[in-house]
Amino acid sequence: MTKWLKSGAHAKRSGRRSTIVLASSLALILILISSATLELTRSPSPNKNVSSKVTTSSSTTSTTTSSRISTTTTTSFPTLTPGGIYSSQIRAENNLPGTSQWRITGIQSPGMISGFAQSTYATPGTTVSLYISTPAASYKIQAFRMGWYQGLLGRLVWTSPTLVGVSQPSCLFLASSNTTECSNWSASYKLTVTNSFFPGDYLLKLTASNGGQEYIPLTVVDPSSNAAIAVMNAVTDWQAYNNYGGYSLYHGPAANYATRATKVSFDRPYDFGFGFGSGDFLGNELPLVALVEKLGLNVTYINSIYLNEHPQLVNNHEVVVSLGHDEYYSPTMRAALQNGVNSGKSVMFLGANAIFRRIRLDPSALGPDRIEVNYRDPYLDPLFGKNNAAVTANWPSFPDAAPESSLIGIQYQCNPVNAPMRITDPTSWVFAGTGLGFGSAIPHLIGSEFDQFIPFDPHPANLEILAHSPVLCRNRPYFSDMSYYSAPSGGGVFATGTNYWVASLTAGCPPFVGLCPDPATDQITENVLLAFAAGGVAYKHPSNANALSVYYHPPIPPLAPVAAPRPTALPTTTSSTTTSTTSSTTTSTTPPTTTSAPVSSTTSSSTSTSTPTSPPRSTTTSSELSSTSTS
């Protein structure tokens, strides 16, 4: 039996994306077991593989080889040798009794209760202030660690005493940047993150006496972890789409792009309609979290803010996992991943549209890195002409263009689409155990945004295209690509090229996916996780440089644009007039035989022999399109 939770990817993007949001909500497996909870006291570093770890305290300098994204950060941070692939601690943690009590239940409406944390992350032994507003007389807080837990996906770790409800004042509004921030709220509760908080992804569930329920997400980070796998919560992406107070980086009131914010604050709750306050965690991240913990892999958790503050941590792990939608990157964040690959580490991009928006992070009254800045128009950014590398235009754009493909291999192209993934390199190790062959289709896996290999932008010379799936986006032909390349350092980079990947995994069942959960996507993800977590993937699995061949000679033909329907001829009084009118109407309204986008030299399904050129790249996401459009 499955049950839907109203949440998921991109909940506040637009009318076009809202259907996809609800669709990418999680179908959660219900298993009737005891909901009793057990709190265990653990050491502050439960994910460490002591036998293989070398710990030193050093001042590490992080730089990048690309002058376009150059950044240098010197911070004292432990240097560790990554541990093994599997973790007995993760297995033991997930054998503890799970519960479905973390779910939002009952009839909910905005304003019943909401809140935010002073920091997006916490470490064991620290205290985090929570800011909560509710008209209810009282409320309580429950901390749920999210994982597999017999398929229930959560474990109750802590419950607060009953607290007195307070209606906080209206949030501040900074008109110069259309920023809503609630730094004028009073702290409601100070949460001490004890050793019973096993590091991982947490949902703090707020439950008010008026029946209101909402989440505050929190990443509990272990700074001393040397887990082979580091899963990164894309909180800078969540905040970009957060519409709390009526403003996001996409629009202002009434979905007006012209009044969008240029700065958004973490000092506010996530909007009620955005995963019930959990941001994009439930639809675009939790399914992967559940899978890695179900497999008992040696995993730890970070988020994008923590990466920005501690870029050196990448070298303490074999692989960093970027999840379903990870669009907003500061130069420091991007350089951290690039430096990791240059040093023999690996990155998995399990989404599309990653590293597309360049941001910087400013402090707020509540702490550092609480204001996310993204002007998009470089001329509006006050740093334009002074420090162009920090100007918050899109990464592929003027004035300091650095397309994401130089790291990922492929790059964002367009949205929205919903199409099957087509396998074109089935002999790759990536597909071992899936039973997939050439041309095999995984239904509805491409969407809503997708990435494609474009040879005219920087890319690794040995890039391998694993799936080359024809799609139509806004009636233009494109391909969505899955890619892999091995780095000279010994690391590797894998990219799915589609937003829907994570939602199709073990714990997610969007209705637009045929067989769900899809065993092929689970197996592919496991194959790559195991290979990357072992280290040295480039030596075991050197990539087959086929990207140029696939691009210029597509093994599966492109789709032809759909012609607009011809109008019905107007009625006339005579046969001769009718013929003349029909002819005139047909001549004047027949769609042109060419389009502004390249198409196959034939409209049939046969493979085109013409040399393709790059389709126009969309620089907008679906929230910037008309809100009247539908997916």
Image (cartoon, helix red, strand yellow):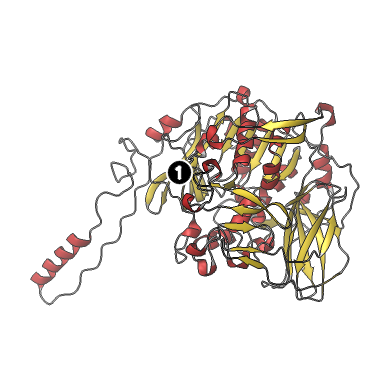
Read off the residue under disc 1.
398
Q: 50 and 573: which one is in front? A: 50
Picture quadrant of residue 107: bottom right
Give the vertical position of 126 relative to 454 (above or below): below
Give the vertical position of 546 relative to 18 (above or below): above
> Which residue is at a point 47% across and 65% down the rendered structure image?
627
Q: How many marks?
A: 1
Q: Quadrant of the N terminus?
A: bottom right
Q: Taking the image as drawn, is residue 9 in sight?
A: no
Q: Is residue 287 left or right of residue 458?
A: right
Q: Residue furthest front?
A: 386
* Residue 60 picture location, percent across and down: 72, 31
Q: Residue furthest left?
A: 576
Picture quadrant of residue 37: bottom right
The crowd level at tag 1 (other Cα within 10 Å; few <14, some 14-19, many 20+) is some
> Which residue is at a point 31% across and 35% down the rendered structure image?
609
Q: Taking the image as drawn, is residue 95 in sight?
A: yes
**Element on which disc 1 rests:** loop
* Residue 626 picture location, percent across and down: 44, 63
Q: Is residue 445 left or right of residue 345?
A: left
Q: 501 and 403: which one is in front? A: 403
Give the vertical position of 43 relative to 625 (above or below): above
* Residue 492 picture location, percent across and down: 60, 30
* Residue 631 picture location, percent across and down: 48, 60
Q: 343 and 275: which one is in front? A: 343
Q: Is residue 113 left or right of residue 417?
A: right
Q: Amino acid at mark 1?
A: Phe
